[in-house]
Image (cartoon, rainbow, N blue to C red):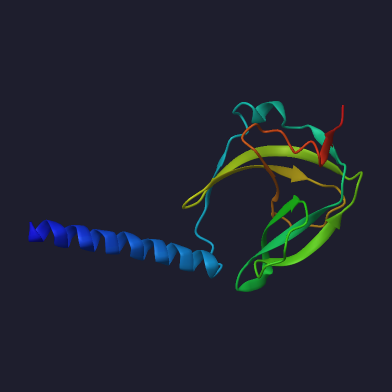
Amino acid sequence: MRKVKLFVKWTILGVLGAIVVLIALGVGGYRLPVSDAEVTQREPFSKFIGREYLVKVPIEAMFWNDFPNKEKIVSVSIGPATAKTRFVSKIVPIGVGQRIRLVSAWQSFALLESNKYYRVSISDLEVPEGVPIHLDVNSDGIPDASIYEPIK
């Protein structure tokens, strides 16, 4: 019986320790490795590839760096204004009326989350060659109608 109590005690301590480590990594701003999978051919995303949208409200392009190397841009995400962190090298405003074209659909998998997004093209946004531009969406695959208006 004593061995069982000792085992339970150490198991609980181990789980609590793992939770503390995950919280510390999150608070410290450590980005855990992410793997991405293309889902362009899957429904509902396949219905939207190639479509163009107009921006209805001012948004921003956030240029994400490879911290601590703030000069190396690894991706750009577009959307409503957010707070700048040490992982964002610069923020560029995107005005009302800007055209955005959906190029491909992706899903990223991280330690505790999954995220769906489109890779898009924006004609007037200067992005380093080979750096993808992301537009996050919900699982329904539809860009936020309060921000993006489809061009018929």
Query: Which residue is at the front of the view, 102 or 128?
Result: 102
Query: Which residue is at the front of the view, 100 or 28?
Result: 28
Residue 34 in percent (x, y) is at: 52, 53
Query: Which residue is at the front of the view, 79 or 39?
Result: 79
User: For this view, does 117 lie left or right of residue 143?
Assistant: left
- Residue 3 in sight here: yes
Name the residue located 81 percent from the left edge and 39 percent from the top edge: 146
Establish if 70 lies above or below 108.
below
* The image quarter in which residue 19 lies: bottom left
Residue at the far left: name it: 1
Q: Which image quarter is the C terminus in? A: top right
User: For this view, does 50 lie left or right of residue 55?
Assistant: left
* The image quarter in which residue 12 lies: bottom left
* The image quarter in which residue 6 lies: bottom left
Residue 59 in percent (x, y) is at: 82, 52
- Residue 128 in sight here: no
Residue 103 in percent (x, y) is at: 72, 38
